[in-house]
Image (cartoon, rainbow, N blue to C red):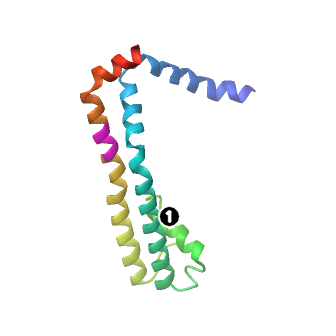
């Protein structure tokens, strides 16, 4: 109980301040409006991750990438640009696959930012109507 009060109470109090920022409602509306486009992006990114993990598994030696889940882990860590370093390619073909995956994933992960940004711009342009509806 003490931990909840010590760590979560300040967070809850900070979140309660958001109700005084009317423009925060615009960001929530922009995220809500862009939700229908996101499942397609998640599906496409999962297909890219699965295909690249298969390619990594095929081109790397078994002493480096011992199983398909290890290849999937390397692909997932590369896609999310975390790069833990526990698995890394050692062959030239592995470096090529991982480099292409890294470039593709950085470009692809920029798409949701653009979609949400476009929706925020649309919400910002109609902000007087949206804010009026929330006040009523």
What residue did someone put label 1 on? 76
Is 86 placed left or right of 39 in the picture? right
**What residue do we see at 24% from left, 29% from top?**
125
Range shown magenta: 115-119
The secondary element bearing badge 1 is classed as helix
Q: Residue furthest top?
A: 136
Dominant SS type (magenta): helix
Q: Is residue 98 above or below residue 110?
A: below
Q: In the rendered view, does 97 fall on the left or right side of 6? A: left
Residue located at (44% from left, 83% from top)? 91
Q: Where in the figure is residue 3, as x and y percent of width and height? A: 71, 29
How far across and how far down the image is residue 22, in percent?
Answer: 38, 20
| Residue beneath the point at 41% across and 62% down | 44
Q: Is residue 98 magenta?
A: no
> Which quadrant, please, contains the C terminus?
top left
| Residue 117 on the magenta span | yes
């Amino acid at each position: 109980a003490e931990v909840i009060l010590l760590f979560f109470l300040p967070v809850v109090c900070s979140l309660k301040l958001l109700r005084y920022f009317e423009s925060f409602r615009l960001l929530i509306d922009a995220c809500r409006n862009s939700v229908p486009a996101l499942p397609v992006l998640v599906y496409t990114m999962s297909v890219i991750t699965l295909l690249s993990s298969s390619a990594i598994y095929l081109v790397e030696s078994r002493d480096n990438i011992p199983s398909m889940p290890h290849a999937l882990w390397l692909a997932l860590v590369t896609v999310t640009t975390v790069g833990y370093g526990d698995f890394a390619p050692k062959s030239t073909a592995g470096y090529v696959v991982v480099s292409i995956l890294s470039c593709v994933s950085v470009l692809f992960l920029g798409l949701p930012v653009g979609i949400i940004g476009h929706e925020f711009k649309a919400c910002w342009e109609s902000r007087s109507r949206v804010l009026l509806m929330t006040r009523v």
